[in-house]
Amino acid sequence: MEKSSTNTAIINSLSASTRAEILINQRPELLNGHEWLQFSNGWIHTFMRNRHNLKNRLMMSGEEAGSAEVDTADVQNQLKEVKEALRGYESRDIYNMDEETGLYYRTKNLCRVSGGVKVHKTRMSVAFFCNADGSSKIAPIIIGNHEKPRCLKKRSDSDLGFHYYFFNKKAWMNRVHFRQIMGRFNNRMKKENRRVALVLDNAPVHDDRDLAYSNVKLVSFPPNTTSHYQLLDAGIIANFKKY
């Protein structure tokens, strides 16, 4: 009994999300031989939420927040236009770029947040760039808040051997950065004597129709569909955020 009371005191001193995990892991011990009690993980999380204000918050941004409801039939029709635009390009010449605009790298847990806990909002944006067959993977494009972050030790991105660091107050992709990136990408394709297609979401910053690139053709996904059909959303960005 004394051991049980001590365990309860320790558990109560922890965050609600941590308490739920402990209850799940110690379920056989807590049941004390009553095997007929079969509490599922979902039941325990619901119990903790109701008793301790544990909330399951999924912080949605960008494509996920804007694509909850999509007319599948309409999307398929619009995707035909995308396929038609890519006709004639080999897999190695079809590129995809996608930004993760909400990389809250100082936040411990984005899924379960106990009530009253302040979420750290320091963030950066990371854009990923690769082709369809995986033979060309351009270094991630980083957009931060500062011209020379402390981690760079007063050196520029060029000093460190890469050329894809940008900065602005909100650490977002903007039209100026996008045009700089596209200019460099077009020059690279020109040097390699290649003509390629770049598939993007239809964000306003990607609207570059007033400029023509000699070696890069821009192709946009239909509105509110990129989380369903974006190539880089097929696990690549998720793995980057995990590791």
Image (tube, helix red, strand yellow):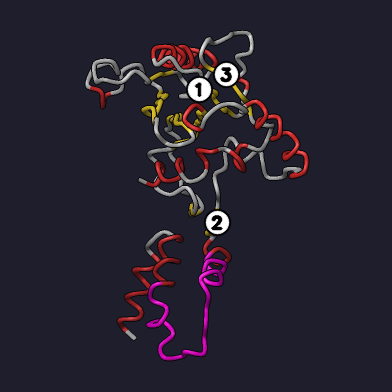
- First in sequence: mark 1 or mark 2? 2
Instruction: Tell me the tag on residue 217.
Output: 3
The answer to whether 167 is drawn above or below residue 97 in the figure is: above
Residue 225 percent across, percent down from the top left: 66, 38
Foreground of the two, 181 or 149: 181
Q: Is residue 6 left or right of residue 103?
A: left
Type of the residue with mark 1 = Met
* Residue at the (25%, 23%) spot, across then down: 152
Per the model, the C-alpha gap separating discs 1 and 2 is 31 Å
Q: Are marks 3 and 2 in contact (CB under 8 Å)?
A: no
Please tell me which residue is depicted at 52% across the width and 59% down the height of the picture.
54
Q: Where does label 2 land, which residue?
A: 55
Q: Are the residues at dot 3 and dot 1 in contact (C-beta closer than 8 Å)?
A: no
Q: CA distance from mark 3 to mark 2?
A: 45 Å
Q: Residue at x 43, y 37 (%)?
A: 104
187 relative to 200 in the view: left or right? left
- The region drawn magenta spans 25-48
Q: Specify the quadrant that holds the C terminus.
A: top left
Closer to the N terminus: mark 3 or mark 1? 1
Q: How many marks?
A: 3
- State the SS at label 1: loop
Classify mark 2: helix, strand or loop. Answer: strand
The question of residue 9 being in magenta is answered with no
- Nearer the observer, disc 1 or disc 2? 1
Q: Which residue is mark 1?
A: 173
Q: Which residue occupies 63% across, 40% down?
A: 65
Neighbor class of circle 3 (other Cα within 10 Å; few <14, some 14-19, many 20+) is some
* Label 3 to label 1: alpha-carbon separation: 20 Å
On the rendered image, what quadrant is the N terminus found in? bottom left
- Compare marks 3 and 2 and give the one earlier in the sequence: 2
